[in-house]
Amino acid sequence: MRMSSNPQPAPAAAVRSWLQLNTPITDWQGRRVWLVGASTGIGLACAQALRAAGAQVVVSARNAQGVQDWAAQDVGVQWHALDVGEPLQVQATARAILAQGPLDLVVYAAGYYQAQRATAMDIDNLLQHDKVNYQGALQVIHAVLPSMLARQSGHISLLSSVAGWRGLPNGLAYGPTKAALTHLAETLYLDLQDQGIGVSVVNPGFVATPLTAQNQFTMPALISPEQAAREMLQGWAQGQFDIHFPKRFTLWLKLLRLLPYRLYFPLVRKFTGL
Ligand SMILES: NC(=O)c1ccc[n+]([C@@H]2O[C@H](COP(=O)([O-])OP(=O)(O)OC[C@H]3O[C@@H](n4cnc5c(N)ncnc54)[C@H](OP(=O)(O)O)[C@@H]3O)[C@@H](O)[C@H]2O)c1
C-alpha cells in the first residue's frame, strides 16, 4: 500500500484552516498592543493574558483603577487615560502611543450596556450607547489606521456581541450598536485584507463582568473574563475573523440567526418571556 506524502488534515485541522482568514498571531513576544476599554472585565483580562504571553500592552479607559499599579510595577504595561467619547482625546492618545512605536494589534473593548425597551425609550441613553460602543470604535480606527496602512501591517479587533446578531428584547440601545460593529468589521476586512492588515470581530456570549452584573436573570453558559481572554488569544492564533465563544452557546445562536422571522420572533418571546 502506498503512503500518501501529503496526508489529509484531521477534521479539526481542516476546520481551523477553513476559519483562518487572517495571518495567525501566535508569538506575542515584543508585539505591541493597544487595548481600548480595558480597565475592567474582558479588556483587562485580555491585556493581562497578552502581557503574560510576552506582549507590550498599552491600556486605556477612563478610570485607572487597578491598571495604574500594574503599570507602575511592569515596564511592559502602559496606562493612557482616555474617554472614547472625546474625539480629540482619542487622536492625541493615539499620536502619543504611536510616537513610541507601531502597534501590532488594537483591541476595541470599550462598551456600555443598559437594558432598554421601546416602551420606555430614553434617547440620551440610546445615543450614549452609540457614542461608546460604535462611534468610539470609529474614532480609534481613524486614529490608528493611517499608521497601519503606511506599514502594511497590524490587526484591528472589535469587541462586538452575540446581542448584535439579531433583535432581542431589552436590546434597543445596545443591540444595534453591536450589529453596526460587526458590519463595520466585515467591511474593514474586505477593504484591508489586501493591505496586510488583519481584522477580527469578537462575539462573546455571557461573561461575568461589571457590564453584565446588572442582569436580573440567570445568564446561560456564563464564563469568566479570563476564559474569554483565552478564547480571544486562541482566535488570533488561529487567524479567525469571527471569534465567538463559548461555542456551547454561540453555535445555538448561529442557528437561531438562520431562522425566518415567522419562527424567530415567537421563539425569542418563548425563551426570554418578554
Ligand atoms: N460581558 C459580556 O457578557 C459581554 C458579552 C458580549 C460583548 N461584550 C462586550 O465586551 C466589551 C467589554 O465589556 P465587559 O463585559 O468587559 O464590560 P466592562 O468590564 O464594563 O468593560 C467595559 C470597558 O469599557 C470602558 N469604557 C466604558 N466607557 C468608556 C469610555 N467612554 N471611554 C473609554 N473607555 C470606556 C470601561 O472603562 P471605564 O469605565 O474606566 O472607562 C471598561 O474598561 C464591551 O464592548 C461589551 O459590549 C461583553
Image (cartoon, rainbow, N blue to C red):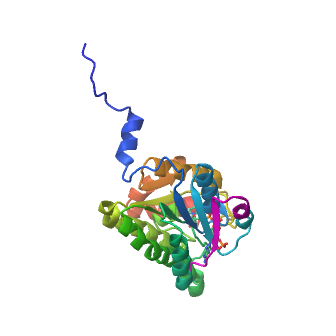
Q: Quadrant of ligand 1?
A: bottom right
Q: In the rendered view, would you say 165 is above or below 86?
A: above
Q: Is residue 76 magenta?
A: yes
Which of the two residues, 91 or 161, is positioned nearer the viewer here? 91
Q: Residue drawn 61% across and 60% down?
A: 42
What is the total number of numbered labels drawn onto the structure image?
0
Percent position of residue 53, x then y = 58, 49
Residue 40 position, x and y percent, is: 67, 64
Name the side, left or right, on which 38 lies relative to 30.
right
Q: Residue at x 39, y 61 (%)?
A: 153
Question: Which residue does the image show at 46% across and 50% down from the upper left?
Answer: 25
Relative vertical location of residue 199 with respect to residue 3 in this rendering, above or below: below
Q: Nearer the viewer, residue 222 or 24?
A: 24
**Residue 136 place in picture, x, y as percent:** 52, 77
Q: Residue furthest left?
A: 2
Question: How far from the left and from the top, in percent, is residue 127?
Answer: 54, 83
Q: Is residue 36 visible?
A: yes
Can residue 267 be seen by looking at this rendering? Answer: no
State the image quarter where residue 44 is shown: bottom right
Q: Residue at x 36, y 69 (%)?
A: 150
Quarter the C terminus occupies: bottom right
Q: Is residue 19 left or right of residue 62?
A: left
* Occupied quadrant, residue 257: bottom left
Q: Nearer the viewer, residue 227 or 197?
A: 197
Quadrant (top left/top right/bottom left/bottom right) for the N terminus: top left
In front of the other: 259 or 31: 31
- Residue range in magenta is 70-85
Residue found at the very far top of the displayed protein: 1
Reply above or below: 32 against 231.
Answer: below
Q: Is residue 8 left or right of residue 99?
A: left
Does residue 193 show up magenta in the picture?
A: no
